[in-house]
Image (spheres, helix red, strand yellow):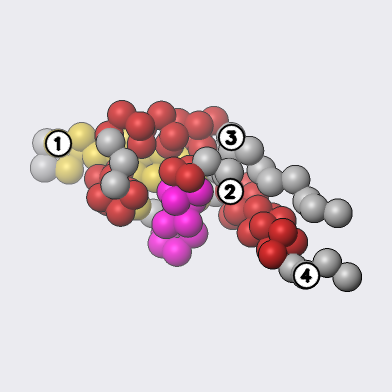
């Protein structure tokens, strides 16, 4: 039987954001924007959805008098990502 895929992570952009954050301690908003190729508005909406799900934290601060948004994964986000990957792998396995 196939495992259900997490609807929060099943979005291409949200999955890309989490994939990036899994491999780093934290990432600036502009870095995520550059790596995903998303518009600032779309990225902002998807970051907010991940934050509301408890998968990431978002810290807003300033750097050289410019606003700076930093995103970081949470334990809940790591666990959800790992479960999503395992569920996806179940789709790729040959049936017995």
- Residue 53 is tagged as 3
Magenta stretch contains residue 23: yes
**SS at circle 3:** loop
Of the two numbered discs 1 and 4 in the rendering, the one whose residue sits closer to the viewer:
4
What x and y, as percent, mark residue 73?
Answer: 50, 50
Q: Main secondary structure of the magenta part?
A: helix
Q: CA distance from mark 1 to mark 3?
A: 28 Å
Of the two numbered discs 1 and 2 in the rendering, the one whose residue sits closer to the viewer:
2
| Residue for point 12% across, 36% down | 65
What x and y, as percent, mark residue 91?
Answer: 72, 59
| Residue for point 41% across, 29% down | 45
Dot 2 and dot 4 residues touching (CB under 8 Å): no
- Residue 66 is tagged as 1
**SS at circle 2:** helix
Among numbered discs 1 and 4, the one appearing first in the sequence? 1
Residue 58 in the image: above or below residue 89 = above
Residue 23 lies left or right of residue 40; in this view the side is right
Name the quadrant of the N terminus: bottom right
- The residue pinned by badge 2 equals 77
Binning the other alpha carbons within 10 Å of mark 4 as few (below 14), some (14 to 19) or many (20 upward) gives few
Magenta span: 15-25
What x and y, as percent, mark residue 10?
Answer: 58, 44
């Amino acid at each position: 039987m196939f495992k259900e895929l997490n609807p929060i992570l099943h979005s291409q952009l949200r999955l890309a954001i989490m994939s990036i954050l899994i491999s780093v301690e934290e990432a600036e908003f502009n870095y995520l924007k550059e790596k995903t190729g998303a518009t600032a508005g779309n990225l902002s909406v998807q970051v907010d959805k991940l934050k509301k799900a408890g998968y990431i934290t978002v810290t807003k601060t300033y750097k050289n008098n410019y606003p700076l948004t930093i995103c970081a994964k949470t334990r809940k986000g790591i666990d959800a990502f790992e479960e999503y990957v395992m569920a996806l792998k179940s789709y790729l396995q040959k049936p017995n």
